[in-house]
Image (spheres, helix red, strand yellow):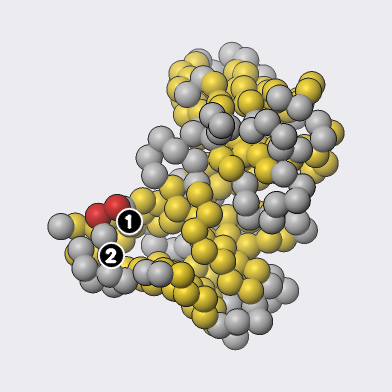
């Protein structure tokens, strides 16, 4: 009963191109979403968030899009850089707790 | 600040043995969280404390798991007896009450392998 799902375990993108990471959720009552980034041997760090009153939030090379009707969000990274290679987790807040997806491993190829 | 400190960083044990994972939160942080990361389920919240008191342990898998926070600077997660399916990376995180809920500072994790 995964409430937040990331169906792509891995993604490989060429440096300079756009990376698109996807996430689906099950509960239409969720109203705040987040993306975290995790490097090997480190804990996750907060990257960007979006409230359900918006459909887009941008921070430099990172943009998160929210489609409430489809219960889907995506993280766009453009242009992709080698330092973006990491595992990305989407998450939501439920009952004041963070609920994470399974993660997507992004590899940026030179 | 040293950040959240976890020990050990790696643990290999045999099925049936007791495992104790340790966490030192960032000084001044009054929330402490224990997470488990697996390939299938991603990051799952196991339990969290506020001011050393367990608030929500609904994510603890079963009675074999227990967590304590005897003081503001130390917490343990214990598995007894351990089973191969407990193999995962266990993270501890902390934050201050005044911070937003997503502002959790994670430790580097403990990679546990139960043979």
Q: Is residue B51 above or below residue B97?
A: above
Choose between B5 and A67: the one closer to the eye.
B5
Question: What percent of the width, then of the height, locates residue A79?
Answer: 28, 69
Image quarter of the N terminus of chain B:
top right
Residue B47 position within the rendered picture, expressed as x and y whole percent measured from the top left? 72, 39
Residue A99, image quadrant: bottom right
The kind of secondary structure element at disc 1 is helix
Chain of the residue that carries numbered disc 1 in the rendered image: A
Which residue appears farthest toward the bottom when viewing the image? A69
Q: Residue at x 62, y 22 (%)?
A: B22
- Discs 2 and 1 share one subunit: yes
Task: Tell me the CA gap for discs 2 and 1.
Answer: 7 Å
Q: Which one is in front, A86 or A11?
A: A86
Q: Is residue A27 above or below residue B37?
A: below
Q: Is residue B110 left or right of residue B34?
A: left
Residue B48 makes an appearance in the image = no
Q: Residue at x 68, y 31 (%)?
A: B27
Q: Residue at x 70, y 52 (%)?
A: B99
Q: Residue at x 39, y 44 (%)?
A: A39
Q: Position of residue B49 (x, y in %)?
A: 77, 37
Visible residue check, residue A51: yes
Q: x, y (%) of residue B3?
A: 56, 33
> Label 2 neighbourhood size at 10 Å, few (<14), some (14-19), many (20+)?
many
Under tag 2, what secondary structure? loop
Dots 2, 1 in contact, CB < 8 A: yes
Q: Using the image, name the chain to which the residue with label 2 belongs.
A: A
Residue tagged by mark 1? Answer: A84
Q: Which residue is mark 2?
A: A80
């Amino acid at each position: 009963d995964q409430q937040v799902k990331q169906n792509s375990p891995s993604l490989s993108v060429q440096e300079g191109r756009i990376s698109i990471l996807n996430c689906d959720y099950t509960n239409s009552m969720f109203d705040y979403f987040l993306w975290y980034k995790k490097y090997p041997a480190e804990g996750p760090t907060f990257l960007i968030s979006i409230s359900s009153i918006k459909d887009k939030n941008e921070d430099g090379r990172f943009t998160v899009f929210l489609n409430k009707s489809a219960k889907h969000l995506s993280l766009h990274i453009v242009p992709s850089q080698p330092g973006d290679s990491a595992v990305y987790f989407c998450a939501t807040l439920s009952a004041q707790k963070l609920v994470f997806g399974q993660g997507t491993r992004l590899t940026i190829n030179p | 600040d040293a950040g959240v400190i976890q020990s050990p960083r790696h643990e290999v044990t045999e099925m049936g043995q007791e495992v104790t994972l340790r966490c030192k939160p960032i000084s001044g942080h009054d929330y402490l969280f224990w997470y488990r990361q697996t390939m299938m389920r991603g990051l799952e919240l196991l339990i969290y404390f506020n001011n050393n008191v367990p608030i929500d342990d609904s994510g603890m898998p079963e009675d074999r798991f227990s967590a304590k926070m005897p003081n503001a600077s130390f917490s343990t997660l214990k598995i007894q007896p351990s089973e191969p399916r407990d193999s995962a990376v266990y993270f501890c995180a902390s934050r201050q009450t005044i911070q937003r809920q997503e502002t959790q500072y994670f430790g580097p994790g403990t990679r546990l392998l139960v043979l």
